[in-house]
Structures are given as C-alpha cells and as structure tokens.
C-alpha cells in the first residue's frame, strides 16, 4: 500500500518537473490536429495528461466535500463545471497534442 502511494507521489512530481518542457509546445501549437508533431504529443502524454488526471481526481474530491456548501450558496452547477467537468474534458476529450 505504501509503495502505491510512493509511486503516485513520484509520478506526480515527475510530471510537474516535465511540465515546463512542454511550454514551448503550448506556445507554438497551431491548434490544427493535422499538423501536431510528435514532440507535442509526447509532451502531452508525459506531462499534461498525468497532471490532468490528478487535477480531475482532486477536483472531484473537492467538489464532493464542498457540494453541500455550494448547494446552499446556489452555485452547485458552476462548482461542478469548474472542479470536475473542465479538468475531465481537458484530460480525456481533447485531441492528443492540442493544448
């Protein structure tokens, strides 16, 4: 059990360390799926997708904890969109290499 937690923490730290390497790919990307290079795709797989998965999980956990308060405050759907839906779409529904 401890090994699984350590692996997860090391994977997250590794992905955060590699995230700056994809910064140039993000800035230069033409947003045309037909012209995405293997470098953009690699940066997406190695850095952006793991961070997206982590933010989706953390966002869902935060939403579950805060949902009673957001329901009382009247912004339940907005909090769901910001904490769960947007990270999920960024991680799982966008084309590979398109940031």
Image (spheres, helix red, strand yellow):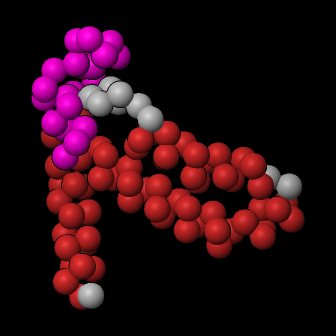
* Residue with the most extreme bottom position: 2
First to last magenta residue range: 24-46
Reply above or below: 99 against 76: above
User: In the rendered view of the protein, which quadrant contains the N terminus?
Assistant: bottom left
Q: Judge left or right: residue 24 versus residue 76.
A: left
Q: Position of residue 30 (x, y in %)?
A: 30, 13
User: How many marks do you count on the picture?
Assistant: 0
Rendered residue at 27%/19% (across/down):
29
Q: Judge left or right: residue 21 versus residue 65.
A: left
Reply above or below: 66 against 90: below
The quarter of the displayed image where residue 55 is located: bottom left
Rendered residue at 68%/53% (across/down):
79
Q: Judge left or right: residue 36 versus residue 64.
A: left
* Residue with the most extreme left position: 39
Instruction: Say if the magenta span includes residue 28.
Output: yes
Evaluate whether residue 98 shows in this view: yes
Rendered residue at 86%/65% (across/down):
72
Q: Position of residue 52 (x, y in %)?
A: 38, 49
- The secondary structure that most of the magenta stretch takes on is helix
Rendered residue at 29%/53% (across/down):
50
Instruction: Say if the magenta span includes residue 55.
Output: no
């Amino acid at each position: 059990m401890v090994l699984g937690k350590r692996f997860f923490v090391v994977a997250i730290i590794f992905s955060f360390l590699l995230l700056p390497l994809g910064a140039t790919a993000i800035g230069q990307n033409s947003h045309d799926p037909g012209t995405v290079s293997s470098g953009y795709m690699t940066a997406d797989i190695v850095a952006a997708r793991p961070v997206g998965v982590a933010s989706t999980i953390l966002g869902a956990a935060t939403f579950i904890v805060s949902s009673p308060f957001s329901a009382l405050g009247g912004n339940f759907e907005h909090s769901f969109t910001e904490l769960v839906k947007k990270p999920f779409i960024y991680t799982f529904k966008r084309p590979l290499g398109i940031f």
